[in-house]
Image (cartoon, rainbow, N blue to C red):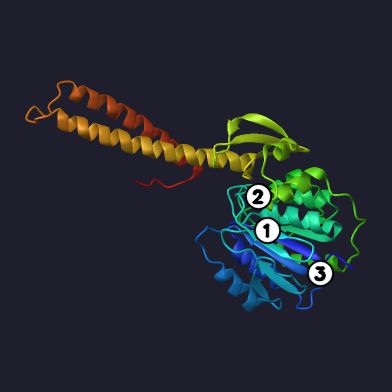
Amino acid sequence: MGKSVIVIGASAGGTDALIRLISQLPGNLPASVFVVLHMAADASAEPLLRGINQAGALPCSRAKADEIFKQSHVYLAPSDHHLLVKKRTLLVTKGARENRSRPGIDPLFRSAAVAHGSRVIGVLLTGNLSDGTAGMLAIKRCGGVCVVQDPEDAAYPDMPRAALDNVAVDHSVPLAGMGALLSQLVAQRPGKAIAIPEDVAIEARIAERVLSDLGSVDALGDQVPFNCPNCGGVLWQIEVGKFLRFRCHTGHAYTGDTLLAEQSSRIEETLWVALRMFEERKNLLNAMSDPRSRKFVKSAASRAKESDVHIQRIRAMLISSEKSTGKTSTSR
């Protein structure tokens, strides 16, 4: 039997890329295809589902918990749920976010690598930051094949480029030629089965919520002196080769760049709250500085000016952050 499991991950620009890729695959493809597209928790997967079913020969459906999967079929991760692959069935879970995402690409890739080893083909398409790289490493270490979209061909090249920088990727091709390549790879005999690395197996079990304790994560790396921005728990640093990741004992996981992005987002939220509070304080002090007020306070005017100094400093920090990230200025 050939390589019978294809796992595909995409983020920004992924809807169009996934439809284009899956439309290239034959209706009798002797493999099961599993897809994660990053989407907001309240987003609908309907446009992608409809696009795949209209454009291609392979039927596509939303993955369901405990469903027995079959060949020549595409299974799409539902919004706000991780999709995990077992030997014959699917798991659809509300586990902790990985790389700020649920569904996450890494949990899908890792689960397939543990369950199906050398029979797995991992495919990483367009997207920002580096979700998917750790999953590709897991696939490679379990004997599978790694395929990425040529970064020059991707609408957002960060994800495929991160994989190329950190994984011994087998193929990097433009989207237009990827369908034919996958058909060829599926027909090839899988490599020799190899033992699943223990750290990959542990992380796969964490995603299933079977494990979520200090001892499990402690076996993966070393504690570092900063906290998970999602839950406030301690983080462990995990290194595979030169690729750096972080994980907390409740299940949240980050690559270095996604952790930095999440920290920056939390700092910005804190600055907006501080700005609002200082503005309210300034308004109250200005009201109290009016001699006609029954609550007149002689020092209120000078204290209002001090608050305005803090307001201007916080605004400057927010403007600087918007310029560095390419955001447009917004009011809150």
Query: Which residue is at a point 82% across and 54% down the rendered structure image?
Result: 170
Please tell me whether residue 299 is drawn above or below residue 251 in the rendered image: above
291 and 322: which is toward the camera:
291
Q: Which residue is mark 1?
A: 9
Mark 3 or 1 closer to N-term? 1
Residue 186: in sight, yes or no? yes
| Circles 2 and 1 in contact, beta carbons < 8 Å | yes
| Circles 3 and 1 in contact, beta carbons < 8 Å | no
Q: Residues within 10 Å of mark 2 (few under 14, many from 20)?
A: many
Q: CA distance from mark 2 to mark 1?
A: 9 Å
Frontmost of labels 3 and 2 is 2
Farthest residue to the left: give it: 292
Query: Which residue is at a point 75% across and 36% down the rendered structure image?
Result: 219
Amino acid at dot 2: Asp
Please state the horizontal and vertical placement of residue 64, each as a whole percent of the image.
Answer: 65, 68
> Callout 2: helix, strand or loop?
loop
> Callout 3: helix, strand or loop?
helix
Mark 3 or 2 closer to N-term? 2
Please state the horizontal and vertical placement of residue 209, each as a whole percent of the image.
Answer: 67, 51
Mark 2 or 1 closer to N-term? 1
Please tell me whether residue 86 is drawn above or below residue 67 in the rendered image: above
- The tag on residue 52 is none
Amino acid at dot 1: Gly
Q: Which residue is mark 2?
A: 131
Please state the horizontal and vertical placement of residue 79, each as a whole percent of the image.
Answer: 57, 62
Query: Which residue is at a point 74% across and 44% down the rendered structure image?
Result: 165
- The tag on residue 183 is 3
Please state the horizontal and vertical placement of residue 296, each as a whole percent of the image.
Answer: 12, 26
